[in-house]
Amino acid sequence: MERMETSYEHLRTLVEEGKLLPLREELLEMNEIDVAEFLEQIEMPQRIVVFRLLPKELAADAFAYLDSEIQREIVQAISNRELFSLVDGMYVDDTVDFLEEVPANVVRRVMAVADPETRETINRFLQYPENSAGSIMTSEMMELHDRCTVAQAMSQIRTSGEDRETIYICYCISDSRRLVGTVELRDLIFHEPDELLRDIMDADRALICVNTHDDQEKVADIARHYDLLSVPVTDNEGRLVGIVTIDDIVDIIEDENTEDLERMALMQPSDDTYLKTGVLTMFKNRIVWLAILMISATFTGMIIEGFESALAAVAGLTAAIPMLMDTGGNSGNQASTLVIRGLALGEIRIRDYFRVVWKELRVSLLCGSALALLNFLRMLVLGNRNIPMILVVCGAMFCAVIFAKLVGSSLPILAKVVHLDPALMAGPMITTIVDAVTLLIYFFLARSFLFG
Amino acid sequence: MERMETSYEHLRTLVEEGKLLPLREELLEMNEIDVAEFLEQIEMPQRIVVFRLLPKELAADAFAYLDSEIQREIVQAISNRELFSLVDGMYVDDTVDFLEEVPANVVRRVMAVADPETRETINRFLQYPENSAGSIMTSEMMELHDRCTVAQAMSQIRTSGEDRETIYICYCISDSRRLVGTVELRDLIFHEPDELLRDIMDADRALICVNTHDDQEKVADIARHYDLLSVPVTDNEGRLVGIVTIDDIVDIIEDENTEDLERMALMQPSDDTYLKTGVLTMFKNRIVWLAILMISATFTGMIIEGFESALAAVAGLTAAIPMLMDTGGNSGNQASTLVIRGLALGEIRIRDYFRVVWKELRVSLLCGSALALLNFLRMLVLGNRNIPMILVVCGAMFCAVIFAKLVGSSLPILAKVVHLDPALMAGPMITTIVDAVTLLIYFFLARSFLFG
């Protein structure tokens, strides 16, 4: 955030001048996210000096927001006692996130200093598949027995709530630890102290949960659909094992959006931000589909080769090829973008297939007619007087737009039917198919009307 | 959500058989979002019958989640007394959202039944520019004086908290209503009753706010950066006038992502979901850029025309054109997608320009070499023995990939510099530029080496 830039400037000066006491004062006033950003802006060995100035809790909170590279650096520089205090102060889900990114020797050191209970939890969490609900949840939720009274619940929250990631949504469990309902802190505040949780809890909400092995995308979908602040995670027996909170859900939503975009441009999704991804990784992420699409253009080349003598015979036929290809590609790209996004947000379902195609057919008739007419005028203005030739180009354009919109809207839905990611069926993929068909139509029309 | 499908089925049967009492029982057990979804699945006049079965609060909550078309239908069918109870039960931001979408006569009826204070608030909210923080905020936040004690604050929350959209973050204001800090409900619970808010509040958080006229994108950026459950909105004098809560922020994030995607495919962003947008609107959203890009392909056509006789002289030269164009377009699309996304998430800033270009240069050297080599083999395998011609195609391919990646990564950043939306500089726009340059390089190489 821009607003902090001048503060950081000032803090850097304090670091350079070695004024650690005033620096500490100012850091204490800041929130953990800005402290983390500041730590990322300075270099070793100052970074570790500043980090050591922070009180335990702020250090742990800020640490969770640091880039994994810097986390590793700090862990390697601090003592075992400091490391213990760090792990103790962090939420389990943040510790797990951090451990997933660092080398094995760092993991071993952290595990060695953690207390046995935390160690066991961390071990269990590390075993969940990547991007599963289990791998992103935290076990620090506020659990309450459904037999408690409101007063008992409040006193339990006062005793143990401080370590919990959220106390605003509390989870009611039965004797067998099954999730049976939720109760909001606001409900506890507005109810009489002697009421039973079982009577005031929202039992219906217990059904809105995910399994540890569900994909994180499902967590985000449920949170978005039901406007939840946290989503409970249960094991196969329906026992509550963790929650995913809204701050992590917002991150998931952005990650999923980035992944969709990367897939749409036919790249392997990258785990890191742009500037942090290495050149070789980027090359690997991009080259596979570039190569596949280049090879498949062989097909388009063959179509042209089969028609090369005819192209040579009529002036201007070849010149229209890029325009036809691009217009087809752009038309298909528009349709597929909207359908892929609609599918991702759940606004379009597989059963809407015919409604989508029917809509695209009408839109493409309008777009195709308008573009064909415009092209007719364009070619006239450019001084072309070969009317049959102009009509062939316009006809091919019209057909290309309709075909592109139908393919662009159909392929993402069909991909979903066969459990492929619809995002793969975006612009580049559509273009390759539309190119070949557009050229076939073009040459067919040319052969029929210009070489009759 | 799929899990509700069978319940809805069952509820529909109850509606059809006129079993209203058991139906009401079941609706009372459901949450407002599922009730809204069920109401959308049935038709008038049953819809209004079911809506009238709902108790006031559930009716208002469910109403806020309904599609605006259906909201209008319901408002037109209910009495003024029912309408009053509906408006009274809804949060102001939901009322404003609803009023922005319905015809003027419905707005007048709602305003007529609302109490004077609500009417004034609604009027003020309706005047904020579209997509501004003011237009999406709610005025129902929990405000506390910074001179209060914890005990006073808790009793105030008990008295007036039930109407507030959130009580988990409370906003501390000074005598002049200026926002001076925030205090979380959890802090109130963990502090002694006689402590002063001024001493326990987080004063730094008061700086993290937006102005009523800021764009909603800024609200989302701040919430995401600081992991906030709600973002305070202040007027030009720094007085607290509203908050935006996380559920609305999640919606903004998804809206902004959809908008970016639509711009990237060169469409006007649509306000509605795919299935609800009319054919004519879709046509209007899509045709402008399709036409502009088609016209600009004239340029590419001219390049080919100037070279038509040479193309006719060497067999296979024309056939390579689609492959070169597509590979260039795909390469540029990959780079621009990553840079646009990086800019949107704030991971790439304008000052990173040279780092980005340097990275793309290296990636494109790798991609270009690999693709040129692959193409060399491909053409040999296909039986082409004209080695100079093959080398010209490979050379053009290599240059096209490098040029495309540099343009694809530069244009979004340059767009940002001149305050254009970087999302406009995506695949289709890049392709049009890359096409022309690729062909120029191709023909230049061909002229130099094949017609020496």
Image (tube, coloured by chain):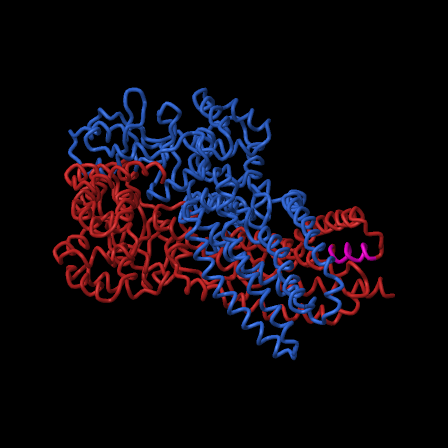
Chain colours: A blue, B red
Q: Which image quadrant is residue A27 in?
A: top left
Tell me if I can see residue B197 in this picture.
no
Left or right of B5 on screen, residue A16:
right
Between B433 and B301, the one lying in front of the other is B301
* Span shown in magenta: B389-397
Rendered-image quadrant of the C terminus of chain A: bottom right
Residue B221: in magenta span: no
Between B205 and A166, the one lying in front of the other is A166
Between B236 and A145, the one lying in front of the other is A145
Between A407 and A127, the one lying in front of the other is A407
Residue drawn at (58%, 67%), measured in percent from left and top?
A395
- The x and y percentages for residue A131 are 49, 35
- The x and y percentages for residue A410 are 50, 50
Left or right of A14 on screen, residue B201:
left
Tell me if I can see residue B71 in this picture.
yes
Task: Find the residue positioned furthest to the front.
Answer: A452
Helix, strand or loop: magenta stretch:
helix
Left or right of A276 on screen, residue A138:
left
Residue drawn at (80%, 54%), measured in percent from left and top?
B390
